Each structure stands twice: as structure tokens, then as C-alpha cells.
Image: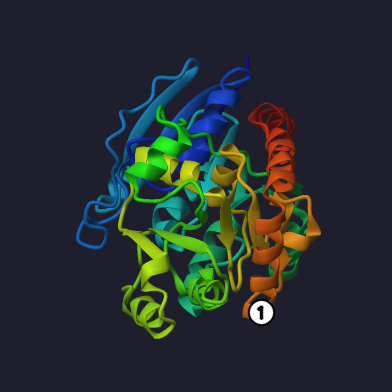
Amino acid sequence: MEKISMLSTLPPTKGLSPYTLSLVKELSNIVEIEFYGFKSIYPEFLYPGGTKTNEKEPKIKNVIIKNYMAWYNPLSWVKTGFSIKTKVIHAQWWSWFLAPQYFIVLSAAKLRRKKIILTIHNVKPHEKSFIKNFLNSSVINLANEYIVHSDDNKNLFLKLNKTKKKVHVIPHGVIEMKKPSKSKKELRKQYNFTDKDKIILFFGNIRDYKGLDVLLKSFSNIEGAKLIIAGNPWGGFDKYSSLIKQLKINDKVTSFLGFNSDKKVAELFTISDLIVFPYKEFEASSGAGTVALNFEKPLVVTKVGGLPELVKDREVIARPNDGRDLEKKIRYALKNLNKLEKEARIKKKEFSWGKIAEKTVEVYK
């Protein structure tokens, strides 16, 4: 069995752990993995309570986990870089904030002639900034080959990075999450909803580019529906609270702000009829979108990044930052929930981790 190294996060560290855990579990059936991660990924004063979950470090066959790195200790980054013994290192890259750590680790690997494969989860930083773009590029330039999650991502990546290096397209797998023991009916009663309610869910970190303001305006015109907002606000929630009051939809909107446990997330997906991703701009594939597929839920998405690849029916793809078009797509989806549920089950099979692992190992070779 061949051996590779991987650089990313696994539970209990937050970051890219749900994605990495699913990928590593499947890869471990084909290759041995030396996994390099973090014992402390971000400063707690910047992310209070937001760097760790209550999960235990996983034990996976054919995987040795070495969580050496700490954000405050550059020597730990150097140690990681010079600990890598395998010919191939596969790094998961998603945040400009980690550029110093990744730059040191991958530079050390490059000095020692290792093959560096970089999976690019965000082709460019979500918020525009010269510094963020510079840090992003400093890591990207170190790789020998790249993996992105969609053809749109590949085209944008090649537009932003004039490179002749290989860029492979391998889909983002479905993020698996345990389904609740209680039924949908029981959970709706628990959360004070009725069987007749048409429930729309907005899920994920609440940031300007994700378009919650656009969704609120569209939703305000849809009769007989309820909206759940579940996520952690970046930069406060005041502007959304004000908009909810202004639109007079307080009685139709329920918010679960801050970090929601996996158990609660699973319950909220279970009670929902439709998941909406109203992103204004996006250059990646959505982990949250694949969570929705895990629960086989109908989706409405905007035509940005890899979101359109999560759905079969083109009628549920809205123009970004267009409230009227989003409203039209939501109305269509609410009338065709059974059809869209069947299509979500088909899409779920397309994003299986087994196929993704096989394609990834081909890149290693």
C-alpha cells in the first residue's frame, strides 16, 4: 500500500474537518496516510469558542495523525514541514489566514523535492483584499498540481493563475451527518412548527456575500412559508434584524444564531422543506450544500461557483443578487418539492466519496 501525507484539519479542530474526515476515511482504504494538523489553529480571542468541537480525535485505519502545529509557534510549522517523509503531500487549502503556516510547511516540503498537490476550496478569498489575494497566491504558487471541485472553479482558477501546471476537477463529496432519532413530525412540534408549515432554511456562516438580505426581501412576498436562519454572524446581525422588522416578517422568521451543534443542525435540516443558498458571489463549492444533499433536501441556489452543480432542475437556479428571480425560483420549488426530493437523492449518489477517493489517488500517481 502506497503512503501519502495530508495537511488539513480533523475533529475536534474546526476548519475543514467534516470534508477532510470523509475524504481521509475513504482514502485510507487505498493508501496509508500521515496526517498533519493543528493543536491550535486560530487565536481564541479572535474566535472565542469557535476553534474546537466536542468531538474526539478520530481513529482511522491506515492513518497516523500528527497534530503538531500551533498558530503561535512558528517552530511547530517548521517541524511539520521537515517531518514529512512521503513523496506526495496533499494539502487542503481554504483560508488565507493560514498562509504563514502553509507557506512554511510546503516550502520545507518543496526544498526536499516532495510532490505538492493542493486542493483549492476557495479559488479566491471571499472578501476582496490585496493582502488576502497576495497571501493566497503565496501558497498556491508552491504546488505542483491542483484539485478544484467544478469546471467553473477550474476556469476561474486558470483565469486568475496563469499556470501550465495540471488542474484536476474532482467533486466535493456529500458531508455526512447522522440523522435524528426523532421523526420530522416530533421535531416540528419540538421547534413550535406545524405539519402544514412550509419551512425554508438558510444555513451557514452569515456573511454579506451569502445574500441573506436578498433572501429576506424575496421571502417577505411568499405567503404561508416560514424561514429558519441558522448560522454564525460575521460582523453582527443588526442589519438583518432591522430588515426583518422593516419587512414586518418577525412572526415568520426563527433564528438560531451562533454555533449550532451537529445534533441541532441535523434537526433543522430534517424539519425543513427547502434549503436556499442565495449567494451574491462565490468561487467555490459549498460544503453546506452537500449537507443538504445528505438529508436529500430540495435546493434553490444562485448561479455562482459550484452551487448549480448541486441541482438537476435548472428552474431552481436564480440569478445572483436578484430578489425577484430568487422569489420566482422559491415559489417554483415549493410547488415541486416531491420532484426535487427525488432529484436530490440522485445527486447525492453522484457525489459519493468512493469515486472521489479513486480519482484523488490517480492524481497522486
Residue 358 drawn at (x, y percent):
71, 27
Q: Quick one: 251 or 240, which is closer to the camera?
A: 251
Q: Is residue 57 above or below residue 97?
A: above
Q: Which colour scheme is used?
A: rainbow
**Residue closest to the far bottom:** 246
Residue sitting at x 67%, y 65%: 331
Residue appearing at x 39%, y 85% in the figure: 246
Tell me, yes or no, if residue 306 can be seen here: no
Indicate the position of residue 208 as horizontal and vertical percent values.
47, 74
Based on the displayed image, in which of its 4 quarters is residue 275 positioned?
A: bottom right
Q: Name above or below for residue 37 compared with residue 330.
A: above
Disc 1 residue crowd, few under 14, some 14–19, many 20+, Cα 10 Å: some
Q: Along the horizontal axis of the image, is 115 left or right of 228?
A: right
Placement of 235 over or under 24, stated as above or below: below
Comparing 165 with 150, the one in front is: 150
- Split into 4 quadrants, where in the image is the C terminus? top right
Residue beneath disc 1: 324
Answer yes or no: is residue 346 visible.
yes
- SS for tag 1? helix
Direction from residue 139 to residue 326 in the image, left or right: right
Task: Point out the image quarter for the N terminus.
Answer: top right
| Residue type marked 1 | Arg
Q: Position of residue 69 (x, y in %)?
A: 32, 43
Q: From the viewer's perspective, is 190 left or right of 64? A: left
Q: In this view, does 291 lie above or below 225?
A: above
Residue in the picture at 47% in, 39% down: 18
Residue 175 is situated, as x and y percent measured from the top left of the image, at 54, 39
User: In the rendered picture of this protein, how many numbered marks are placed on residues?
Assistant: 1
